[in-house]
Amino acid sequence: MESVTPAYKRIVLKLSGEALRETGGRDTISPQIVKEIARQVKEVYDLGVQISIVVGGGNIWRGLAASHRGMDRTTADYMGMLATVINGLALQSELEQSGVITRVQTAIEMQNVAEPFILRRAIRHLEQGRVVIFVAGTGNPYFSTDTTAALRASEIGADVILKATKVDGIYDRDPKIHPDAQRYEKISFSDALTKRLQVMDSTAFSLCMDNKIPIIVFDMHQPTNVRDVVLGKKIGTLVSD
């Protein structure tokens, strides 16, 4: 009989903005994909796990890419932060339609849209069984949503960061280019640094390493993967101390 005892009590699920759109699709946010993400989150929610979500904004706006095309980097990054708010609200809407009580907390204050990020309030929401969606990044330019995930995980005392991607883990080289690329089942922080594996950006990775927060990189497109990871099954790649 399958074990339904979660391996983690409190998690941060990191979603890229691109995860909310269909490949080649015209919509920046796919209602079908958002509905599927909400379904997977609810499966974990029903296990009694405390869930927070950090979502990117790359499906709508990429600040770094815009700065490379001549836009002021600070302005471009703030625009990217606002894009994450749109994605967070889309997730909240679908989760609440699924019966999951949700709060959106933003690092850039906007009273009519979301709560301001207040650490004690966020922890209280989690303890009360609400999913907390963190948006607007850290509230500062030059920091990615990977860094936001690492920072919020450190602040709330999360057991793990689940980084949902389009690939089934971390490889020694790009599996799309090299068919013989080897996937790591488990790797240490120091080895990931030495091998220059792009798990997260350097700021985010350093925060996780310093605070001993494991990262699991896995494929979001498999319908049971989020639940399976939370139940401790060997899905994707584990990066740990």
Image (spheres, grey):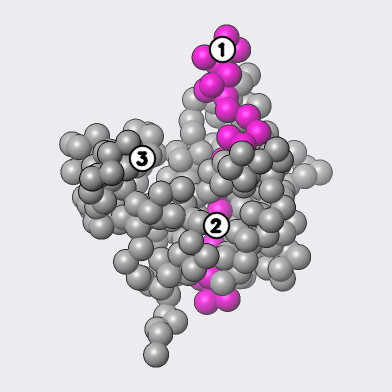
* CB-based contact (under 8 Å), mark 1 and mark 2: no
Magenta stretch, residue numbers: 44-71
Task: Looking at this view, name the residue that lies furthest to the right.
Answer: 112
Q: Residue 29: x percent and y percent?
A: 69, 44
Check disc 3 and give the amino acid type. Lys
Circle nearer the viewer, 1 or 2: 1
* CB-based contact (under 8 Å), mark 3 and mark 2: no
**Above or below — where is 140 with respect to 45?**
above
Q: In this figure, which residue is indicated by the disc labeled 2?
A: 52
User: How far, Cα to Cα, is label 1 from label 2?
Assistant: 33 Å
Q: In this figure, which residue is indicated by the disc labeled 1?
A: 69
Q: Earlier in the sequence, mark 3 or mark 1?
A: 1
Q: Residue 230: x percent and y percent?
A: 43, 68
Query: What element does badge 3 sit on?
Result: loop
Q: In this figure, which residue is indicated by the disc labeled 3?
A: 176
Q: Any magenta on residue 179?
A: no
User: How far, Cα to Cα, is label 3 from label 2?
Assistant: 31 Å
Query: What element does badge 2 sit on?
Result: strand
Q: Earlier in the sequence, mark 1 or mark 2?
A: 2
Circle nearer the viewer, 3 or 1: 3
When asked about the image quadrant of residue 32, the answer is bottom right
